[in-house]
Amino acid sequence: MKSTEAAGERFFRQYYKHCTAPDNDTLFNFLNSAHSLNDKIEKSHGKGFFDIEEFTVVKALRNIFHHEGELINEVRVIPVEELPPITTDLAFLCLVPSSLIEQSFESIPKKYREKEEKIISSKVRSFSR
């Protein structure tokens, strides 16, 4: 249980750091801490975040960073004060290039790909200029 608590504390520290002082490494660290917390919760409670469809999206993006190589150059931190007003019906908004989403499909093991690709496609919206 102590390792689950430590993973939870790390997750929230990384979340806070990414929200208050984001840089190219904070997203990587936050995604890794979410994945690690899921692993610990599964071990200690027998159930993790996989029932949460949004976690499937986060996991796929994290797996690109973790297994496919450094893609930090694809992450751009944009201070909100530099953005024009944005209106969305989404509770959470994360802007990533569509090519990165497409690449995330390839990081999914073949036996899960069809199911997870549908989940990701249903949770990700494409915006273009």
Image (cartoon, grey):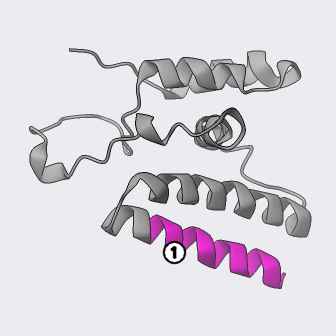
Label 1 belongs to which residue?
A: 13
Residue 115 screen position, x and y as percent: 75, 21
Mark 1 closeness class: few <14, some 14–19, many ≥20 residues within 10 Å? some
- Give SS at disc 1: helix
**The one of 60 and 51 positioned closer to us in this rendering:** 60
Residue 27 image point, x, y percent: 48, 53
| 97 sits to left or right of 78 | right
Q: Quadrant of residue 114?
A: top right
Up the image or down, 123 lies above or below 50; here it is above
Highlighted magenta segment, given as a residue range = 1-16
Magenta residues: mostly which secondary structure? helix
Residue drawn at (42%, 69%) of the image: 17
Give the left or right position of residue 65, taking residue 50 as reference: left
Q: How many marks?
A: 1
Residue 60: x, y in percent? 65, 34
Q: Quadrant of the C terminus?
A: top left
- In the image, residue 8 above or below residue 89: below
Task: State the image coordinates of residue 73 (x, y, percent, origin top left).
Answer: 43, 38
Residue at 64% over, 62% down: 33
The residue shown at (18%, 35%) is 87
Question: Relative to residue 119, is residue 21 drawn left or right?
Answer: left
**Residue 4 magenta:** yes
Seen in the picture, residue 49 relative to 107 is either above or below; the reply is below
Q: Nearer the viewer, residue 41 or 33?
A: 33
View extreme (bottom): residue: 2
| Amino acid on which disc 1 is placed | Arg
Question: Residue at the location (32% across, 68% down)?
Answer: 20
Q: Would you say 128 lies left or right of 22 here?
A: left
- Quarter occupied by the N terminus: bottom right
